[in-house]
Image (spheres, rainbow, N blue to C red):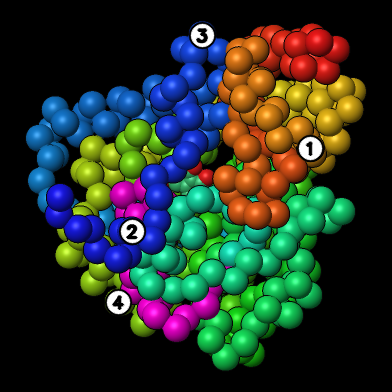
């Protein structure tokens, strides 16, 4: 047995994936973290065309200039962020961008503020980099929205960064503009970094998304194509940061991956340039499902916030054995505690499954767990 490095020992494999592997394949899966839609035709065609053109060589480390120019336009139009192609790095998913941030800026002695609960990768990235987690509680009373006052209380001289994720995985919470702005101001006053994971930006209902980079220069904005264009397996994302930050991030990207896949980059150009109607249709369908699942859960007595974004709900379920019982009955869910201590007493349910399957899943829970 070869001993792993201490940094590898400090983390564990995701329990969520492990659980999927052992459950009944006929169960309805409300554990999924990816859209159940196909990649739009125009994007598929652009990728096929790129292969037929033998566009399969290395690209510039930061990504194709055409793609970075489209991303600059997107930041201006959608987020009010003025940037330029030199400040963009195209990455292998938002996942790589998160890892790069931690590797480039976090080291032993640094504290990184994370919303509690939050996406599993954040903690792992910080720990691998040798940093320490400082959780900031997101309470159900605030609909799980991260509040600037709670963040301010946790800042000290060791604070290196905070990760923001609005809309949020696992809660679906969308932060309020004033909290995002206040945290952005704080990052300038106290000189820490904001790593803003905006991967669910477009999956938002009757609410506006705000980027902290509008108000602070200490921000790395991360986004990608996995959720908006159902391109999860194509592994393509991007980040925007000021020149100095970008230079450090590029070192990590360059020596790790050289560049993102050509085919996916060509698909991403088409995703941004082409019609957006498939993405809009998908969001409308998610909203219909959100309305259904929230209504059904509340009716069953599982208190559920009417989450304003992403495709997750985070009902309050005190039964410690709920996830196992539900899986046995044929519905896969994820225990809230997997996302941080504050997730205890909750269950994450994804509605990236068909309307009919969600109805069926709710019927099963009602018959077998509530009335059974
Ligand atoms: C909050 C959050 N950030 C990042 C990612 C990773 O996205 P990508 O597929 O672009 O690596 C996910 C995927 O589930 C996520 O939920």
Pointer 2 residue: 9
Label 1 CA crowd tier, 10 Å (few <14, some 14–19, many 20+): few
Above or below 366: residue 220: below
Q: Is residue 316 magenta?
A: no
Q: Secondary structure at mark 1?
A: loop
* Mark 4 or 1, closer to the camera: 1
Q: Quadrant of the C terminus?
A: top right
3 or 4: tag closer to the N-terminus: 3
Image mark for residue 247: 4
Q: CA distance from mark 3 to mark 4?
A: 48 Å
In primary-sequence order, the first of circles 1 and 2 is 2
Mark-to-mark CA distance, 3 and 2 = 35 Å
Ranked by sequence position, the earlier of labels 1 and 3 is: 3
- Indicate which disc, 4 or 1, sits on the residue closer to the N terminus: 4
Q: Which residue is mark 1?
A: 318
Q: Which residues are magenta?
A: 91-113
Front one among 162 and 196: 162
The residue at 29%/39% (across/down) is 264
Q: Residue at x 14, y 39 (%)?
A: 55
User: Does dot 4 land on a helix, a strand or a loop?
Assistant: helix
Q: Residue furthest front?
A: 1
Q: Secondary structure at mark 2?
A: helix
Q: Which secondary structure, mark 3?
A: loop
Q: Which residue is mark 3?
A: 26
Q: Is residue 169 above or below residue 113?
A: above
- Is the residue marked by circle 2 packed among few (<14), some (14-19), or many (20+) residues within 10 Å? few
**Is the Cβ of the residue at disc 1 closer than 8 Å to that at disc 3?**
no
* Disc on the earlier residue, 4 or 2: 2
């Amino acid at each position: 047995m070869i001993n792993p490095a201490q940094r590898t020992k400090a983390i564990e494999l995701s329990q969520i994936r492990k659980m999927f592997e052992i459950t009944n394949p006929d169960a309805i899966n409300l554990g999924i973290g990816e859209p159940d839609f196909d990649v739009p035709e125009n994007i598929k065609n652009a990728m096929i065309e790129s292969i037929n053109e033998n566009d399969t060589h290395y690209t510039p480390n930061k990504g194709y200039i055409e793609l970075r120019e489209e991303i600059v336009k997107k930041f201006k139009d959608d987020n009010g962020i003025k940037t330029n192609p030199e400040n963009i790095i195209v990455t292998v998913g938002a996942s790589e961008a998160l890892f790069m941030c931690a590797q480039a800026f976090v080291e032993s002695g640094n504290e990184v503020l994370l919303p509690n609960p939050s996406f599993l990768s954040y903690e792992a990235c910080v720990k691998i980099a040798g940093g320490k987690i400082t959780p900031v509680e997101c309470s159900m009373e605030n609909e799980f929205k991260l509040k600037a006052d709670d963040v301010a209380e946790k800042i000290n001289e060791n604070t290196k960064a905070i990760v923001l994720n609005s809309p949020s995985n696992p809660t679906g919470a969308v932060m309020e503009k004033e909290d995002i702005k206040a945290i952005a101001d704080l990052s300038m006053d106290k000189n820490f970094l904001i790593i803003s994971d905006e991967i669910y930006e477009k999956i938002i209902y009757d609410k506006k998304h705000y980027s902290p980079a509008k108000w602070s220069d200490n921000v790395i904005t991360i986004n990608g194509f996995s959720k908006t264009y159902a391109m999860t397996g194509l592994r393509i994302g991007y980040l925007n940061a000021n020149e100095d930050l970008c230079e450090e991030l590029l070192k990590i990207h360059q020596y790790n991956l050289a560049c993102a896949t050509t085919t996916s980059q060509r698909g991403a150009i088409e995703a941004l340039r082409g019609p957006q109607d498939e993405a809009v249709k998908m969001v409308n369908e998610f909203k219909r499902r959100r309305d259904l699942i929230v209504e059904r859960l509340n009716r069953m007595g599982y208190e559920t916030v009417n989450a304003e974004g992403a495709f997750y709900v985070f009902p309050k379920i005190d039964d410690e054995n709920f996830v196992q019982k539900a899986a046995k009955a044929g519905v896969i869910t994820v225990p809230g505690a997997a996302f941080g201590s504050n997730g205890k007493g909750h269950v994450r349910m994804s509605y990236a499954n068909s309307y009919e399957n969600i109805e069926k899943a709710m019927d099963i829970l009602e018959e077998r767990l509530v009335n059974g």
